[in-house]
Amino acid sequence: MKTVSRRCRQALVLLMVALTLTSCREWRGIANVPLPGGPGSGPGAYTVYVQVPDTLALNGNSRVLVADVFVGAVDQIELKNWVATLKLRLNKDVHLPRNATAKIGQTSLLGSQHIELAAPPDPVGELKDGDTIGLNNSSSYPTIERTLAGLALLLQRGGLSDLDTITTEFDAVMGGRAEQIRAFLDKLDTFITSLNDQRDDITHAIDSGNRLLSYFGAHNDTIDKVLTDFPPLFKYFNAQQSIFINAVEALGQMGRATNEQIAPARGDLHQVLDAMTCPARELRKASPYFPELLQVMITAPYHVDGAFKAVRGDFINTSLIVDLTYASIDNAILTGTGFSGMLRALEQSFGHDPEKMIPDVRYTPNPASAPGGPYVERADRNC
């Protein structure tokens, strides 16, 4: 009877050990046991997932802060699609935009960490139950370990030991040269001011260079062909350099001979060229009218466009319009005489309307002095 009782106790102990071991499969320490009644555990609490590049020392049940207020807790840390993902439980009164940011920070110097949620400057939508904050909106604050490591690197390999040497040499360079340094700074200020005044020109030059390079880029094949074909040409020039040297020497001899011939007549040549200044200037003024003048001068009395229409074999077809009105004859013949205006008055006596007659040249403004003129550019009389 005692043996059976002992075996029953042993079986019961083994059963309890097995149940204990199987129930502890998810056991990760007392820190991961959620506290009843804490933030994120009440009715209406919702779940949010946060993807982070590194969980650092964050663990389950860590705090979730919004504006330094404890509003939730980390419920679980798991790996999803090879990305560390935090499962957060938030109070129902926490309202954040859908593009909220998440940062892992250090709560104390002892290493306790928390995750901080915040709204970005341009909030969009609202964060709801089951939403995920992606990697592009998550980061972490520098930890104590990283700060101390960076400080150690600066102290050991940052060159602080050479600071005394640098300051000593700088003092040696600057000592006794205050006036020279001040003059240099004044010149530097002038240079920078001039450079700033020409920034538009510099920008234009850069744009022009960019357009030039773009043009070269669009003609890479042509440039490559030129660079390929030029070496044989240079090789030929190098082989014929004696010919070029003789040509240059002959050109120099011709220049000396020309100078010997022109030198005695230099004064007369200068006078002739000086006298041609005025005709050349007036010729330049008339240059816009030369094309139209040549179109009539070559095929006078016909315009060049009508000459080929007028000539038909050995015949010339032409038409002549002659204005023999009294007003026209008066303008052409009697103007400037004592009879000026008589034929015009006779034509008006026949009942012709003066407004429809050719204008009277006696009362027509001078084109050179008309209001709004001159309509005719006169030659320089001082030439």
Image: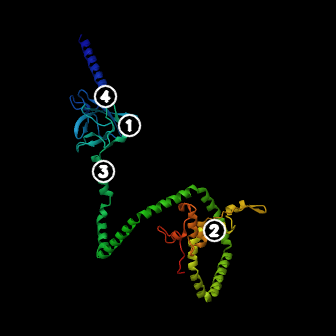
The kind of residue tagged 3 is Ala
Q: Residue furthest right?
A: 314
The kind of residue tagged 4 is Glu
Q: Which residue is mark 4?
A: 26
Of badges 3 and 1, the one in the foreground is 1
> How far separated are the C-alphas under marks 1 and 4?
21 Å
Picture quadrant of residue 60: top left
> How far separated are the C-alphas under marks 2 and 1?
86 Å
Q: Earlier in the sequence, mark 3 or mark 1?
A: 1
Query: The N terminus is located in which quarter?
Result: top left
Q: In the shown orientation, is residue 251 left or right of residue 69?
A: right
Question: Label for residue 149?
Answer: 3
> How far separated are the C-alphas under marks 3 and 1?
26 Å
Q: Which residue is mark 2?
A: 293
Q: Earlier in the sequence, mark 3 or mark 2?
A: 3
Of badges 2 and 1, the one in the foreground is 2
Q: In the shown orientation, is residue 4 left or right of residue 274?
A: left
The secondary structure type at the circle numbered 4 is loop
Q: Earlier in the sequence, mark 2 or mark 1?
A: 1
Q: Nearer the viewer, residue 52 or 230?
A: 230
The secondary structure type at the circle numbered 1 is strand
Q: In the shown orientation, is residue 353 left or right of residue 36?
A: right
> How far separated are the C-alphas under marks 3 and 2?
90 Å
Q: How is the image coloured?
A: rainbow
Give the residue displayed 35% in from the left and 72% down from the top: 187
Q: Which residue is mark 1?
A: 83
Q: Is residue 139 above or below residue 250?
A: above
Q: In the shown orientation, is residue 297 left or right of residue 40?
A: right
The secondary structure type at the circle numbered 2 is helix
